[in-house]
Image (cartoon, grey):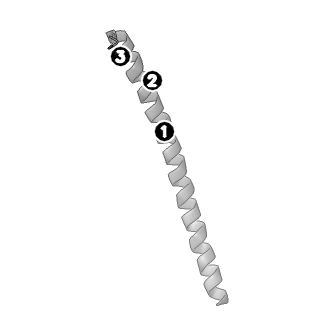
Amino acid sequence: MSKSFSRSDLEQIISLQLESLQAMQKVLDGLRNQNERLERSNQKLRKRISEYE
């Protein structure tokens, strides 16, 4: 059995999906930023460790 949606229903669904995608993009941007910071910290630590070897 298929359910029919009105144009308004579909617009609301699309709007909610867009909001979800935008929220996920913000999370991904935050994770990318955190990853970049971790990479820079790791490089600094590797450099310090190499000074003691």
Residue at the extreme bottom: 53
Place of residue 47 in the rendered image (x, y in percent of width and height, measured from the top left): 59, 80
Against 45, is 19 above or below? above
Place of residue 38 in the rendered image (x, y in percent of width and height, measured from the top left): 58, 62
In 3D space, how far apart are the residues under numbered discs 3 and 2 (Cα atoms)? 10 Å
Q: Between 18 and 36, which is closer to the camera in this rendering?
A: 18
Q: Between 7 and 36, which is closer to the camera in this rendering?
A: 7
**Badge 3 or badge 2: first in the primary sequence:** 3
At horizontal 36% and vertical 10% (from top left) the residue drawn is 8
- Quadrant hosting residue 50: bottom right
Give the left or right position of residue 10, taking residue 36 as reference. Answer: left
At horizontal 44% and vertical 34% (from top left) the residue drawn is 21
Q: Which mark is residue 24?
A: 1
At horizontal 56% and vertical 73% (from top left) the residue drawn is 43
Q: Which residue is mark 3?
A: 10
Q: Which residue is mark 2?
A: 16
Give the left or right position of residue 17, taking residue 38 as reference. Answer: left
Locate the N terminus and report the quarter of the image it occupies: top left
Badge 3 amino acid: Leu
Against 13, is 51 above or below? below
- Asked whether the beta carbons under mark 1 and mark 2 sit within 8 Å of each other, the answer is no
- Quadrant hosting residue 4: top left
Place of residue 15 in the rendered image (x, y in percent of width and height, measured from the top left): 41, 22
Q: Nearer the viewer, mark 3 or mark 1?
A: 3
Badge 1 amino acid: Met
**Badge 1 or badge 2: first in the primary sequence:** 2
- Secondary element type, mark 1: helix
